Amino acid sequence: MNIRGIYKTSLINFPGRICTILFTGGCNLRCRYCHNPELVLGSHELERYSTEYILSFMKKRKRLVNAVTLSGGEPTLDPDIEPFLKELKAAGLDVKLDTNGLNPSVTKILAVEKLIDYAAVDVKTSPEKYNALTGRPVDFGTIKETIALLADFHVPMEIRTTCVPGFAEIDDFEKIHQSLGRVNRYYIQQFVPSDNLLDKEMSALKPYSSPELHERRAYIKSFADICEIRGE
């Protein structure tokens, strides 16, 4: 498994769990606001952690940490994801998958094999704006397919959107609503400008104000059972 980063302890990434976050290298998108460009473009230059190291590391910390979040990059691109997650599950760890939703066939295998206990699907923006934000042609129907199959296999999940100015307008959420229908959990998170973004021009954007974020939350609550703001 192409693990290129480890965040030892998170209290908020995996609902109800204390987890370690593992970051995979490589991604099939080029999101302009990405905070991990080194994982997207230059992961081969980062230290690679072996499966043996990760399992040993997790076993030593099992009294403190009982779960793993597999993030990225995009984890479903890795051909070794299924055997890797089988080893994590065999070690008694719960697994959360962070995904952009563009590999439903892989996600289905993980769901069928009961290798994921929770999933977070990133919905970047409305279908019409996807290409402009992600730098790649995207079939939004593929993301809908991933969300639907997770629901079909009863994998608890959340949908999340980073509120990038200009790409998270009320109109964008209306179009997301029209495409996805009603959902269970939806989290929006504040955009944080940084010099480390993949597109340096994005660092000059002014984030939405707190009232603007709450306006978006209020709309999303019309089609989501739960909607919360992260990083306000």
Image (cartoon, rainbow, N blue to C red):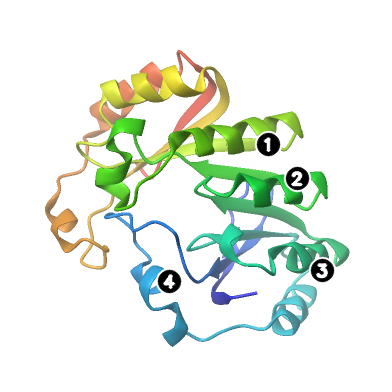
Q: CA distance from mark 2 to mark 3?
A: 15 Å
Q: Give residue 34's quadrant in the image.
A: bottom left
Which residue appears at 67% of the width and 83% of the height?
A: 50
Q: Is residue 145 above or below residue 24?
A: above
Q: Quadrant of the N terminus?
A: bottom right
For badge 3, the amino acid type reads Glu
Q: CA distance from mark 1 to mark 3?
A: 21 Å
Residue 7 location in percent, x, y?
54, 69
- Determine whether label 2 and label 1 are within 8 Å by CB: yes
Residue matched to label 3: 87
Q: Quadrant of the C terminus?
A: top left
Residue matched to label 1: 150
Q: Residue furthest top?
A: 222
Residue 68 location in percent, x, y?
68, 61
For badge 4, the amino acid type reads Leu
Q: CA distance from mark 2 to mark 1?
A: 7 Å
Mark 2 or mark 1: name the one nearer the start of the chain: 2
Q: Which mark is residue 223?
A: none
Q: Give residue 150's quadrant in the image.
A: top right
Which residue appears at 62% of the width and 49% of the height?
A: 14
Q: Residues within 10 Å of mark 3 (few under 14, many from 20)?
A: some
Q: Which mark is residue 111?
A: 2
For badge 1, the amino acid type reads Leu
Mark 2 or mark 4: name the one nearer the start of the chain: 4
Q: CA distance from mark 4 to mark 1?
A: 26 Å
As helix, strand or loop, the secondary structure at mark 2 comes to helix
Mark 4 or mark 1: name the one nearer the start of the chain: 4
Which residue appears at 39% of the width and 56% of the height?
A: 29
Look at discs 1 and 3 and give the one toward the viewer. Answer: 1
Mark 2 or mark 3: name the one nearer the start of the chain: 3
101 left or right of 209 in image: right
Residue matched to label 4: 39
